[in-house]
Amino acid sequence: AGSDRELHLIALNSPQTGDMRGIRGADFQCFQQARAVGLTGTFRAFLSSKLQDLYSIVRRADRNTLPIVNLKDEVLFDSWESLYNGLDGQMKPNVQVYSFDGRDVLKDNTWTQKMVWHGSNNKGQRMTDHYCETWRTGVHELTGFASSLEAGRLLQQRPVSCSSSLIVLCIENSFMTQAKK
């Protein structure tokens, strides 16, 4: 590694409703699926929640310096910071998002709705009315903010019913390895 460090953004292997057993449940799935394919960095769910803004998941020192890449190390964003430039998280064109088991999420019919949960505004701050009760409910009447992967954007604020099964992304933030459990 060394100077060519990068942070991976990879989808969970199956779509999830708004009930992920909270942010810890989502984080744990990211951790397990990364380990299963031999990725040693720490992965956290690409979600805002009660005590966490999406933006803050990647530590300050890495926000401007490391590219965000897919499973195949192709660049999706020049940096974590560049996700929050007001363009609703516009990805680089013609770069795919893959699941941990290597499927192209847009093409694979495991994901019928090509939307990504995030629960944030376009600055990566939590939107408390739109994160499915801290990702603990799948009831139809409540909503979580999601974004259209087909539009190539990760931070559109589209309210989607918490009963919907959408894409969940995981972002690598290796520095957390021995931090709070």
Image: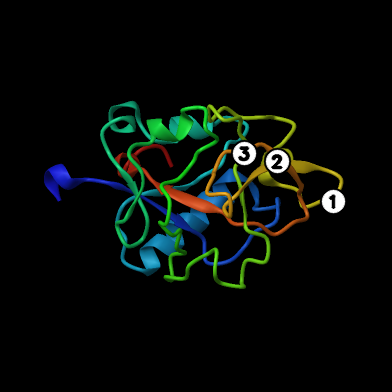
Cα separation, mark 2 vs mark 1, equals: 15 Å
- Quadrant of residue 39 in the image? bottom left
Q: Position of residue 6 (x, y in %)?
A: 27, 46
Q: Secondary structure at mark 2?
A: strand
Q: Position of residue 74 (x, y in %)?
A: 31, 56
Q: Image point 38% across, 36% down: which residue?
A: 80
The outermost residue toward the front is 93
Q: Nearer the viewer, residue 97 or 151?
A: 151
| Image mark for residue 13 | none
Cα separation, mark 1 vs mark 3, equals: 20 Å
| Image mark for residue 156 | 3
Q: Image point 78% across, 55% down: which residue?
A: 163
Q: Image point 52% across, 49% down: which residue?
A: 152
Q: Examine the rendered structure and indicate whether residue 86 appears above or below residue 167.
A: above
Q: Position of residue 25 (x, y in %)?
A: 58, 52
Tag 1 residue: 140
Q: Nearer the viewer, residue 20 or 127?
A: 127
Upstream in sequence: badge 2 or badge 1: 1
Q: Position of residue 85 (x, y in %)?
A: 46, 28
Cα separation, mark 3 vs mark 2, equals: 6 Å
Q: Amino acid at mark 1?
A: His
Tag 2 residue: 158
Q: Nearer the viewer, mark 2 or mark 1?
A: 2
